[in-house]
Amino acid sequence: MDIENIAKICDALSKTVRIKIFKMIVKNNKNGICPCDIASELDIPRNTLSFHLTTLSNANLCYFKKEGRNLIYKPNCRIISELANNLHEDCCDKNCKSFEV
């Protein structure tokens, strides 16, 4: 994963509300989640939620599929895994010692 993608993902997750939305998507990864459920749970107007979902989708953190008249959002587990692996390989290795407080 290149630094541009990492920056795009970090930017997408730079708002508390987007982290909350993303966590809901991740928690519902098996069946996906409808934006109406997210809006209801987080008490977010749908047009505002749409903006945040677009931002998360553009960062490839999630994707949607159409089911009838509904959109169902699911996390992009591959990107999440790539990000975690990339950050982990750059900062932690077998010789790394944790700082003790």
Image (tube, rainbow, N blue to C red):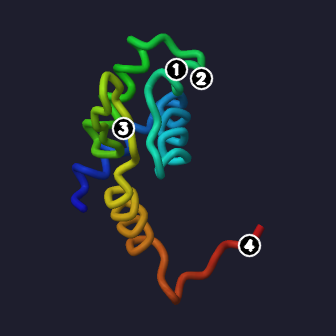
Give residue 35's position: percent from left, percent from top: 44, 25
**Precedes in sequence: disc 1 or disc 4:** 1
Disc 4 secondary structure class: loop
Judging by the rendered image, the residue that carries numbered circle 1 is 39
Q: Are marks 1 and 3 in contact (CB under 8 Å)?
A: no
Q: Are marks 2 and 3 in contact (CB under 8 Å)?
A: no
Give residue 64's position: percent from left, percent from top: 31, 37
**Precedes in sequence: disc 4 or disc 2:** 2
Three-letter amino acid code at the position of disc 4: Glu
Q: Are marks 2 and 1 in contact (CB under 8 Å)?
A: yes
Instruction: Please report the residue visible at 54 percent of the width from the left and 39 percent of the height from the top.
Output: 24
Name the image quarter holding residue 99: bottom right
Give residue 2's position: percent from left, percent from top: 22, 59
Q: CA distance from mark 3 to mark 4?
A: 30 Å
Instruction: Please report the residue visible at 35 percent of the width from the left and 43 percent of the height from the top.
Output: 62
Nearer to us in this view, 32 or 85: 32
Front position among marks 1 and 4? 1
**Precedes in sequence: disc 2 or disc 3:** 3
Judging by the rendered image, the residue that carries numbered circle 2 is 42
Three-letter amino acid code at the position of disc 3: Asp
Judging by the rendered image, the residue that carries numbered circle 4 is 100
Graded by Cα atoms within 10 Å as few (under 14), some (14 to 19) or many (20 or more), the crowding at tag 2 reads few
Picture quarter with the C terminus: bottom right
Q: Is residue 17 above or below residue 13?
A: above
Picture quarter with the N terminus: bottom left
Q: Are marks 4 and 2 in contact (CB under 8 Å)?
A: no
Disc 2 secondary structure class: helix
Nearer to us in this view, 79 or 74: 74
Q: CA distance from mark 1 to mark 3?
A: 22 Å
The numbered disc on residue 11 is 3
Classify residue 90 as left or right of residue 92. Answer: left
